[in-house]
Image (spheres, helix red, strand yellow):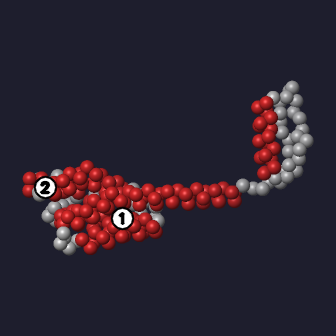
Amino acid sequence: MNIREWFGFKGEYDNTLGINACVDSLLELYSKAIKRYFSVHDAESYRAIQNLDVNGLSKGQRLFLNWLNEKGFPFLNELASRHLPDSEQLIAQIEYDKYILEEEMCFEYPDDVRSSLISIVNEVPEYIQAANEVSVSVSIEQLWDNWASWIPEAQVSECYVSEIIYGKIKENPYKTSNYVESASFAGSLLFLGGLI
């Protein structure tokens, strides 16, 4: 079973992308931390943690388990199933959070581990949102560049505009030489057409 299945995702994803390898390693570390925090080392999925008997837990563990069930696990399940931009900045931010959690894995201070786990769930969505905004911005620029290079600068030797005025088609007295002039001429006809 791969780590995404442990968090409830049964679909396929491209594990050759850097972002997916990064998310997999974060989820791997996250699952190790919560198994160790709750002393459930043989949990076959997050549901084993989700359904723990709260009677044997401390107050802090009960509160954390409640938070995991309400916010943590839903986000981690979504993270496991999302297609994320393969952004170097996003990877670096996730790697940093992973590094912080790795430093706490000695469990000298279990509360610090819990804080790191909560921080990951609270901060990673912000990283993803920023990466998506940059990704969309780049995509729009690429789309515009591709579209602009596709538009031919068609040379028009003679342009005829059909106007249905009194049932006749009139010849356009204005000759245009390229699409820029044609566009502005068409725009002026549209404006004038609304006045007639």
Q: Does residue 53 appear left or right of residue 165 in this picture?
A: left
Residue at x 89%, y 35% (from the top left corner): 170
> Helix or strand or loop: what does disc 2 sit on?
helix
Residue 23: numbered disc: 1
Q: Can you say which quadrant of the picture contains the C terminus?
A: top right
- Dots 1, 2 in contact, CB < 8 A: no
In the image, taking residue 94 as reference, residue 46 lies left or right, namely left
Distance CA(mark 1)–CA(mark 2): 30 Å
Classify residue 162 by image quadrant. Answer: top right
Q: What kind of residue is marked 1?
A: Val
Residue at screen point 17% across, 52% down: 51
Q: Is residue 73 left or right of residue 179?
A: left
Callout 2: 10 Å neighbours few (<14), some, many (20+)?
A: few
| Residue 23 percent across, percent down from the top left | 36, 64
Q: Is residue 100 above or below residue 59?
A: below
Name the residue furthest top.
166
Count the marks: 2
Coordinates of residue 118 in the picture (x, y in percent):
28, 59
Q: Local crowd at mark 1 within 10 Å, few (<14), some, or many (≥20)?
A: many
Query: In the image, residue 137 lies at what x, y percent?
Result: 55, 57
Secondary structure beneath dot 1 equals: helix
Note whether 40 is above or below 154 in the view shown. Answer: below
Q: Nearer the viewer, residue 117 or 138?
A: 117
**Residue annotated with mark 2:** 59
Residue type, mark 2 in image: Lys
Q: Quadrant of residue 99?
A: bottom left
What residue is drawn where x is 65% and y is 59%?
145
The answer to whether residue 16 is visible is no
Quarter of the image where the N terminus is located: bottom left
